[in-house]
Amino acid sequence: MLRQPSIGGPDGYSFTPLVVVELAPDAKEEAVAWLLNKVIDGEQSGGADLLVEQLRPSASDGEKDNRNVFLVGASWQRLLSGAEDLGLFKEFNDGSMRAFTCANRDNFKDFKGDGDDFLSMAECQYIVKHELDSLRAKSETHIPGYEKIKLYPGKSIIRRMQSKGILVQVFPLHETEELKRLSFSWYQKVKLSLQPLDDIRHYYGEGMALYFGFLEYFTFALMPMALIGVPYYLFDWEDYDKYVLFAAFNLVWCTVILEAWKRSSATMAYRWGTLSRKKAFEEPRPGFHGVLGLNPVTGREEPLYPNTKRLLRIYLVSVPFVLLCLYLSLYGMMVYFLAEGWALTLHAAEPGVWTAVLTFVPSVVYAVVIEVMNLIYRYAAEFLTGWENHRLESSYQNHLVLKVLVFNFFNCFASLFYIAFVMHDMVMLRQSLATLLITSQILNQVMEAFLPYWLQRRRNKKMMRRASKRANRGEKEMTLADQVRLEADMSTYLGTFDDYLELFLLFGYVSLFSCVYPLAAVLVVLNNITEVYSDAFKMCHVFKRPFSEPAANIGVWQLAFEAMSVIAVVTNCALIGMSPQVKSYFPESETQLIMWTAAIEHGLLALKLILTFVIPDVPKHIQTKLARLEFESLEALKKKSLIRGR
């Protein structure tokens, strides 16, 4: 018997549905009942203490529904205790952002009555997801009804059932009216204003809002580069010497914008209450497995896995695999240069329109091969990183990002470095950079703009069919059952990883070699403007609603961009040293030129390091507010200790 909450939901359900759990239509009844009992049981019994109801059959005629679709919710008391366990920050009565506690709940702004509407729907869904992910096997040896699917103590139940195809998907529901308002203010109306980041954060969470905030910031930061690049492109195009000034500007630009972004993201994170969120006792990730034991720090029961085994997997399997992939990438690059040389030789022997077009074919084919290799490697890197069995989600992301960035950087930029510093062919460097940049942007636009539009049209046809059936039955609004089944067919958003990776590569094209192709910044600006609208459209109409994730910054990607800026300093200094204008100052001694170039490069790196310390990551007024909160917490702790002593 399902427990009833104190709130009522739509379409006659006894609670407000937050998350949908869909199992396979042919799932064994024992497995379904076992999972539902786990979800319903109290925390003392190892359950999630949530509320579940089966989705009622759709009234649509001629459609066969999956009966193993369940709606999951929670009582307000359970959601509030979950918010305290997760350390969610909410606005206090004095205007500051503080970690929510049930004991102090009446002192939080907007907390009225039993706390109805105190938590946003995105926060409630995040709490429910955390509780579902926390379901782990204890004494069970296998999934009921599936004797061959073994279970081990500490194994994530949701993850295991998904990997074996018993559980199809778990996703949060959209709020149709709020989504309409967000769509209108985000991308449907033509405007010159900024994106509604606070609304995006409220609906999708801080992680998504920070991505769109960084995309917007990066686009505006590119404007000076684009404005300077246009006249450089239009006038004295072949005069490479004048690009020394452009390269010097590049050095300052890539350092300042990243330091300024830290302050901007810190301001947003403080306003949203995630800047001070403690991660000292981060929960184990759902995919982490091991022998069930007690955490020596928290005393909680969780899986334990020897760090030695993880290190052996990393250094004996993952590292050799990455090196093998880098070798294959290098081999592909050499094949490209052979094809490029053959095409240029043919054009020199028989000049003509077709042979001139043929000289661009190797670059285009190589750009496509790069994208395909990056995609294949991405799946392999995800499998390897999951197999390494990292305990924390942050550790998993760090290792995955490191693997992917090393390969993508080598695969995308190795040929440009070879042309610039081995072949010393600036004309070919300019042509290769333009071809790689334009081809990758065309492929990305096809995948991110045209494909989602086609998927949306297909979904609209299904919606129109269901709407016409509702009209025939005299219904005006879509039922919850229809909404759930429509959203179940939508594509799943896989996170911001690919989006940040694309911006990282574009930042590399601009910061490393844009002095030989000044239009690079212009092309990236146009790409980012399209990206904002296409991503907004996809999030609102193509993808299922993703679970929100609290975030204080863009994480390991900040380090990735900063590492790219350091490489940009070295690259641009080398390009400046290679220019005929600079070489003319050292006509007799090339060694002296190299030493001066290295000295300037080291000086700029030192200046970059100084700027990193001089420009604080968090604005002064926010530092003061955080210090005041810490002081008040210490004073409250002293009072509490004094009362206990008395």
Image (cartoon, helix red, strand yellow):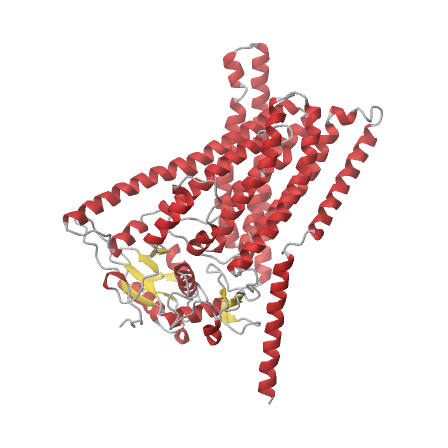
Q: Identify the residue at horizontal 41%, vertical 73% (top origin).
A: 43
The residue at the far bottom in this view is 646
x%, y% of residue 425?
66, 24
Q: Nearer the viewer, residue 498 or 468?
A: 468
Q: Kindly tell me whether residue 331 is visible in this rendering.
A: no
- Image quadrant in which the C terminus is located: bottom right
Q: Quadrant of residue 582?
A: top right
Quarter residue 597 falls in: top right
Left or right, 145 with respect to 399, comes to: left
Residue 421 in view (yes/no): yes
The picture places residue 517, in percent across and down from the top left corner, at 61, 28
Give 115 or 191, whichever is nearer the viewer.
Answer: 191
- Image quarter where the N terminus lies is bottom left
Q: Quadrant of residue 642?
A: bottom right
In the image, 276 versus 632, the foreground residue is: 632
User: Is 59 positioned to the left or the right of 97 in the image?
Assistant: left
Task: Give the residue drawn at x 38%, y 52%.
Answer: 545
- Count numbered badges in the picture: 0
Q: Nearer the viewer, residue 296 or 621?
A: 621
- Along the horizontal axis of the image, is 440 left or right of 327? left
Q: Is residue 396 above or below residue 233?
A: below
Does residue 297 sit above or below 288 in this rendering?
below
Q: In this image, 308 relative to 383: left or right? A: right
* Position above or below: 87 against 240: below
Most distant residue in the right direction: 588
Q: In the picture shown, does residue 314 fall above or below 425?
A: below
The image shows residue 311 at horizontal and vertical percentages of 60, 56
Residue drawn at x 62%, y 49% is 559
